[in-house]
């Protein structure tokens, strides 16, 4: 007997990075099989075209694509917001295929509040001015994730809990903390200027839900984190 899927209004996923070794496709597929969303918002970097290789595309990654298309073939509205790792799709922004739409950003009114969805890479100076450095960082991040898998395997054998090397770096390296804070403030400031009540982005792989106040104006900032 199949388990009943949980009905949800909106699901936001970002930074899945299909096609990379760090992608948690099995866990994500398990989650997708448990829900029945009215809207599914894919907030950028879903397929990692920077590191894509024909030599690595496991069945678990294909299952994610099939599940997304299965949602779209039924009654779920699917919005694919382009990110920097899947920027090739930006030339197709505005394209619709049934319930699947490709966009660069999205505005929705939710419970009477104006909500802005975007990946967020346009506010990343490294992406804008030194893409080669960003790509180098992407390869380094993937290597870090692979190392993290090995460390967690050893940790499990020793009876200890999981650790996240990337999260440790983000929480303890001053330059990383400063970058995250600057990114959040910039996104919030632009969203306030657009008269939004809420802004939801991805890109920096740092999940968050908080209120940000700039010059007396307050906005709800959310980041949907990652699946690596």
Image: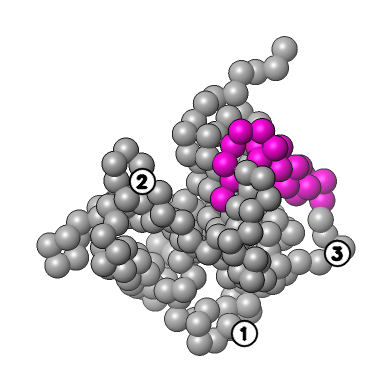
What percent of the width, then of the height, locates residue 90? Answer: 61, 69
For image coordinates 40% across by 62% down, the residue present is 171
Which residue lies most toward the right here? 55
Quarter where residue 194 is shown: bottom left
Q: Nearer the viewer, residue 56 or 66?
A: 66
Where does label 3 land, which residue?
54
Residue 132: image tag: 1
What percent of the width, then of the height, locates residue 49? Answer: 71, 67
Residue 39: image tag: none
Which residue lies most toward the bottom here? 129
Q: Is residue 178 above or below residue 207?
A: below
For image coordinates 20% across by 56% down, the residue present is 218
What percent of the width, then of the height, locates residue 191? Answer: 31, 63
Q: Main secondary structure of the magenta part?
A: helix
Query: How far apart, in angstroms, are the residues tagged by discs 3 and 1?
Result: 22 Å
Label 3 crowd bin: few (<14), some (14–19), many (20+), radius 10 Å: few
Q: Is residue 94 above or below residue 70?
A: below
Tell me which label, 1 or 2, sits earlier in the chain.
Answer: 2
Q: Is residue 155 left or right of residue 193?
A: right
């Amino acid at each position: 007997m199949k388990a009943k899927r949980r009905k949800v209004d909106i699901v936001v996923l970002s930074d899945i990075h299909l096609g990379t070794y760090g992608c948690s496709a099995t866990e994500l597929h398990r989650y997708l099989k448990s829900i029945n969303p009215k809207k599914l918002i894919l907030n950028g970097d879903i397929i990692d075209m920077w590191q894509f290789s024909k030599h690595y595309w496991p069945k678990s990654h294909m299952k994610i694509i099939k599940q997304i298309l299965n949602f779209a073939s039924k009654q779920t509205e699917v919005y694919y917001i382009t990110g920097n790792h899947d920027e090739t799709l930006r030339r197709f922004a505005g394209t619709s295929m049934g319930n699947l739409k490709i966009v660069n950003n999205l505005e929705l009114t939710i419970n009477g509040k104006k909500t802005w969805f975007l990946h967020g890479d346009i506010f990343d100076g490294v992406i804008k001015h030194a893409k080669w450095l960003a790509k180098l960082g992407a390869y380094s991040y993937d290597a870090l994730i692979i190392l993290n898998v090995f460390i967690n395997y050893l940790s499990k054998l020793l009876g200890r809990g999981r650790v996240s090397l990337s999260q440790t770096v983000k929480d303890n390296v001053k330059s990383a903390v400063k970058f995250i804070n600057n990114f959040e403030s910039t996104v919030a400031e632009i969203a306030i200027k657009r008269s939004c009540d809420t802004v939801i982005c991805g890109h920096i792989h740092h999940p968050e839900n908080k209120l940000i106040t700039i010059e007396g104006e307050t906005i709800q900032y959310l980041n949907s984190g990652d699946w690596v």
